[in-house]
Image (cartoon, grey):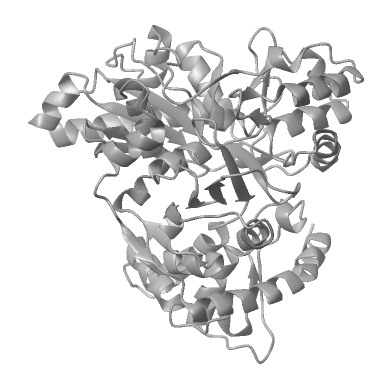
Amino acid sequence: MDIKNAIINGKTVLGIEFGSTRIKAVLIDENHTPIAAGAHEWENQLVDGIWTYSLEMIWNGLKDCYRDLKKDVQEKYGVTLKKIGAVGFSAMMHGYMAFNKEDELLVPFRTWRNTMTKEATDILTEAFSFNIPERWSIAHLYQAMLNKEDHVKDVAFMTTLAGYIHWQLTGEKVIGIGDASGMFPIDSSTKDYNAVMAKKFDALAASYGFDRKLSDILPKVLCAGENAGTLTEEGAKLLDPDGDLLPGVPVCPPEGDAGTGMAATNSVAVRTGNVSAGTSVFAMIVMEHDLKNVHREIDLVTTPTGEAVAMVHCNNCTSDLNAWVNLFKEFAESMGISADMNKIFSVLYNKALEGDAECGGLLAYNYFSGESITGFEEGRPMFVRTPNSKFNLANFMRVHLFTSLGALKAGLDILLKEENVGVDKVLGHGGLFKTKGVGQKMMAAAMNTPVSVMETAGEGGAWGVALLAAYMLRKDDHESLADYLENKVFAGQEGSVIDPDAKDVEGFDTFMKRYLGGLPIERAAVDALK
């Protein structure tokens, strides 16, 4: 009855996140506990060599996800969801959504998965003395200038997927600082785009006849806790075509999946870190001090309140692993065995724990798409072994779990071993950690650091952005996001902690020598299989 009354009286908070393979909605109560959820499965499409989601897919997916949430509320509590206390939207970061002055999308949405901006990133990284990754929005804009793409002359506004959704539902062209930090470098002291770098970009762009200032075409930066507008009447109908949802709901700044991951894992404070492992994988550590050198493998982004974060981002994580699990499911069904996916994942993941520490000499690459850290513009998933490798199911599963973290470890070794970045605790979330203990144990071996997973880890970024919306709605005066999360959300929640096993750490290091040494095999596959 308490939950039912909270729903009726609008005491709930909603978070919706657009992930790579799923759009998820999580409704939370006044204790920040998920009370209902909705989801919509989707996949990016490779159209004319561009990884994209169409506008139709975006809006149909959002409506279906919200419809699924409403159904869950109705079935559990017998009420129709009409009034919400606050809402937040989040999505995969980076990419390129460019609009003309009539607010029309100029080219299909270019997602983070596209790795065709190397020329732009090389020029911008040198000009800024700051690493600009290939998936960043500014890299896509500048590459379009270098390519002399006709649409560039008409660009009047550009934003991220989360920024776009927020704009359409509230009318506000704003963005959360964490999401903004994947568009263009942020100055943590001013909590805004880096003014010196913006001036340098304007000079570079002017030579291509681009007559607008960067400040005129980027969304306004907001920090967590600030009000980013309200759900308009039109926005409420876009979200809920049934017309039940009341407009006027306060909306928090739209955030990227990095920022919501930090919130969902209580890792926004200095010397905390988190790993989000799903279709892509990224690790983030909130830093005490700046890095000594510019590393192309390390991104510098921010928390939802603007603190500097070192981030290692890899395009590929569980896609190939999931493909193999689906193959085993198909085999089971062909044998007439009813196959529950959760059980298949559990059996296969746990089998990996029985394997040799270094995977018995097996080698795999999980590159569905390009991988910047290891220098690949395209990917070819592959599995390789020698005649005398120890080829069994345990090692087979172990090598695919290891390789899902292979590129990530290559970047983390720079951060932890070369730059000596300090980290006291790491929290894991995302699909890789759903099977209890297995992904966590592999991650602890990769980082040689204790890894925690909380019971809420499976809720992911949708829960994280709901927490950011709740913070905006309920925070006390001068209460920091870190304090709000620590004292009001995660108080008393320890989760499970797995310490690194010395044998696993040594085994992962041995595997990494094979992984890095075998990259020419992956290069040959990319060159040979067109």
Which quarter of the figure has residue 248? top left
Please tell me which residue is depicted at 61% across the width and 46% down the height of the picture. 310
Q: Quadrant of residue 519?
A: bottom right
> Visible in this render: residue 147?
no
Could you say where residue 336 lies in the image, as x and y percent from the top left?
A: 35, 73
Q: Could you tell me if residue 420 is visible in this image?
A: yes
Q: Residue at x 67, y 56 (%)?
A: 419
Q: How many marks?
A: 0
Q: Nearer the viewer, residue 434 or 43?
A: 434
Residue at x-position 55% and y-position 67%: 446
On the image, the x and y values in percent for residue 81 come to 23, 23
Quadrant into which the C terminus falls: bottom right
Compare residues 335 and 255 and report the one nearer the observer. 255
**Based on the displayed image, in which of its 4 quarters is residue 125 positioned?**
top right
- Residue 6 in the image, given as x and y percentages of width and height: 16, 25
Left or right position of 236 against 149: left
139 vs 492, nearest the viewer: 492
Is 115 situated left or right of 401 in this image?
Answer: right
Taking 273 as reference, is 289 left or right? right
Where 283 falls versus 163 (above or below)?
Answer: below
Q: Is residue 461 above or below residue 285?
A: above
Q: Is residue 392 left or right of residue 26?
A: right
> Which residue ends up furthest to the front in the rendered image?
289
- Specify the farthest residue to the bottom: 388
Q: Which residue appears farthest toward the right when viewing the image?
A: 207
Q: Is residue 434 above or below residue 306?
A: below
For image coordinates 62% across by 49% down, the residue present is 313
Picture coordinates of residue 204, whole percent (x, y): 87, 24
Please name whichever residue, 248 or 440, is drawn nearer the observer in this view of the structure: 440
